[in-house]
Amino acid sequence: MLDILRRIVQEVSSVTELSEALKVVVARIREAMHTEVCSVYLYDPDTKRYVLMATEGLKQDAVGKVGLSSSEGLVGLVGSREEPLNIDNAPEHPRFQFLPETGEDPFLSFLGVPIIHHKRLLGVMVVQQRDSRQFDSGEEAFLVTMSAQLAGVIAHAEATGNILHIPKTPSEPKKSTRFTGAPGAPGVGLGVGVVISPAADLSGVLDKEPESIDAELARFEQALDGARDEIRMLGGKLKGKLRPEEMALFDVYLNMLDDNALGAEVKAAINKGNWAQGALRAVVMEYVGHFQMMEDVYLRERATDILDLGTRILAHLQGNEVENDTDDYPENTILVSEELTPAMLGEVPTSKLRALVSVKGSSNSHVAILARAMGIPTVMGAVDLPYAQLEGKTLIVDGYRGLLFSNPNDELSEQYQAIYEEEQALAEDLEGLLHLPAQTLDGHRMPLWVNTGLITDALRSLDRGAEGVGLYRTEVPFMMKDRFPSESEQQEIYREQLEMFSPNPVTMRTLDIGGDKSLTYFPINEANPFLGWRGIRVTLDHPEIFLVQVRAMMKASEGLNNLRIMLPMISNVSEVDAALHLIYRAHVETLEEGFKVEMPEVGVMIEVPAAVYQIRDLAQRVDFLSVGSNDLTQYLLAVDRNNPRVADLYQAFHPAVLQALQHIVKEAHAEGKSVSVCGELAGNPMGAVLLMAMGYDCLSMNATNLPKVKSIIRGISREWADNLLSEVIGMESGDVIASTMQLMLEKAGFGRIIGPNVTG
Ligand code: PEP
Ligand code: MG
């Protein structure tokens, strides 16, 4: 069964059109279950009706025409109950509804299962049989499994369909589609999708109408010749190194090209009105899909060969292309790619770049780090995104929440346009805001610091009135290199940060790698990286790396003395003791080398639930504490902060998170130690209000958010914030807390600063 399932899913995945995918599904399931009818009814939430979208066994004329309201028929019953219905005499069932258009009256047996994706009912899948019999439990299990697997494929195809949907009349509402990824860089961007593919990535090639079909045919011929020469050349080079059986592979390749099959099909596709690249992709992918379904392992492997061949031809086609002129990019470009690279960033003039979207990667990918430094709103890891379809589409990127909207409706566009304008206005107002203190109406001072990584970040932060650096992520410069930077190289990098902010403090975190942050030259492969060798655990195991880094920091601070050192991922007091021991040693060594530096303040990050319960023990050992609310939230809620599938569960305002935060500040103050927050929550205007009310001494955030937080703090009183905190702290749901906060701040006139509460 698993094998059949795998093959059906594979076959369906290679089809891009929803209707085609459903046709394949019903045909294969009917065949696999040896039944007479298999149909899929999709639910349309706008009309609240189930529409027959594909069938094998019922009349084809009925497809797309026959529908049932959600309260009608057995299909409606399966949908509303959201569970299978397995009966041996359907017409006798009180909910049976006869649909003459389908010609279904002779079918007695009925098995229907709901198709559900991420709690959303997409439709109902039905198998029917003429004779009266109950489908057995194995058959029922098969259909349930099939439906669960296909829900994702259908949802994906449906989203693609929505993207391609063009309203037939101006009054027809736009189908806005939301995709979830991970926040890569804060900010919002509205614009037009520009999709870029790597040098030769077949699956990312778009369909396009050619200007001249003859010219495309000629280009394709030329590329075929090029690929032929290349394979001959490669084969020739390997002669003598490969065994004759293996050499035969090259003949197979050449045969595939010579045998007119592939070439003829691509040419036919070009003649139908696609450019050479698009036609090549369509044909090759179809072949790949067929081969992948083969029972025979050897034949399945051929799919790889065909893909390789297709990619080679594509490279030749792309070699023929003229380089894209930078003038070609629209004024409001939203750059979309399967995997964005820093080089791709350089292709678009920054003045035209509004936002970035990458299907692969996380907030720690190089491109996201650069985007944060440059202030370009970015969404990473949007795994379900049919990115190739986004060319020329109207898009909104919400880099705060990691969301992307295609074809946004007017209301959504207006809301985001308002945030964008507010951000622009705040940016223009910076001059005015820059020298004003972050102080509430009743005189409470709330120091606002920044998080940095690259020098560009630091420069932007100064422009935005940062009073210090609460988190300098030292792994960022490490990630930009192809080996560990030497002590003197590090010293130079750190000096720049310290000088730039002097006399204000700069909190340098010791190397925090592991988890999702890796160095190409120090790979860590683990089954559970977030629970593995991360942060302080790595550096305590490698004192040579730790000592070099701490010495470089201390040397860099000579004459400035504005350095603070912070330890990430602490889950045991013994780690703090061991790290302090090394830091003292580094200090002595630095003094011995003749540097005149004071012992810096040392602090601990509170990121692991265990540390929350040992605040006092930790605080007694160090000078300050800083809450890494990103990791603390992920570990408290057991939700991977980069996994879009569970993004809804990653609730910054979860009661458990808020109670932990309140506990931390109380305990730290009881020990007389200052405590800050340097996770994203501190830069969230609503979060900042709550944290101030809890009594945090300092908030450290990305430079983009700093002016927003400052203007909100300057617009409220501490008393108002305290009241808000006492109102929400006892609530039992994160969603309710977030919407209460949203409402209260909107009422207080900060709606434009906090942005819309986007759930739809
Ligand atoms: C955090 O975990 O909140 C934090 C600030 O550290 P990072 O995001 O770099 O893990
Ligand atoms: Mg962290």
Image (cartoon, rainbow, N blue to C red):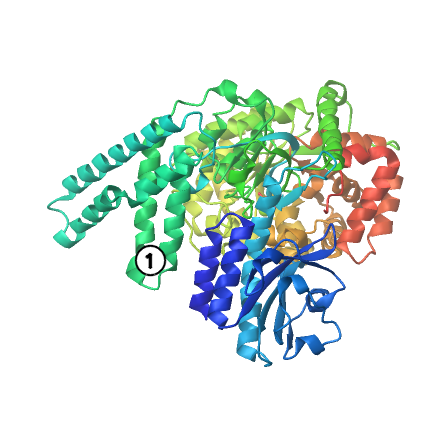
Whether residue 208 is visible: yes
Image x and y of residue 639, in percent:
62, 55
Q: Is residue 493 above or below residue 674?
A: above
Please state which of residues 334 and 710 is positioned toward the viewer in this rendering.
Answer: 334
To which residue does mark 1 refer?
300
Name the foreground residue: 733 vs 164.
164
Q: Is residue 253 left or right of residue 537?
A: left
The x and y percentages for residue 91 are 69, 75
Picture residue at 42% right of the left edge, 53% below the top: 525
For the point 38% across and 42% down, the residue is 521
Mark 1 within 8 Å of ligand 1, using the beta carbon: no
Q: Amino acid at mark 1?
A: Arg
Between 284 and 261, the one lying in front of the other is 261
Horizontal and vertical percent position of residue 281: 40, 41
Where residue 230 sits, quadrant-wise, is top left
Q: Residue at x 58, y 64 (%)?
A: 58
The percent coordinates of residue 31 (x first, y second) are 47, 68
Callout count: 1
The image quadrant that residue 263 belongs to is top left
Q: Could you say whether the residue bearing mark 1 is in a helix, strand or loop?
A: helix
Tell me: 703 left or right of 712.
left
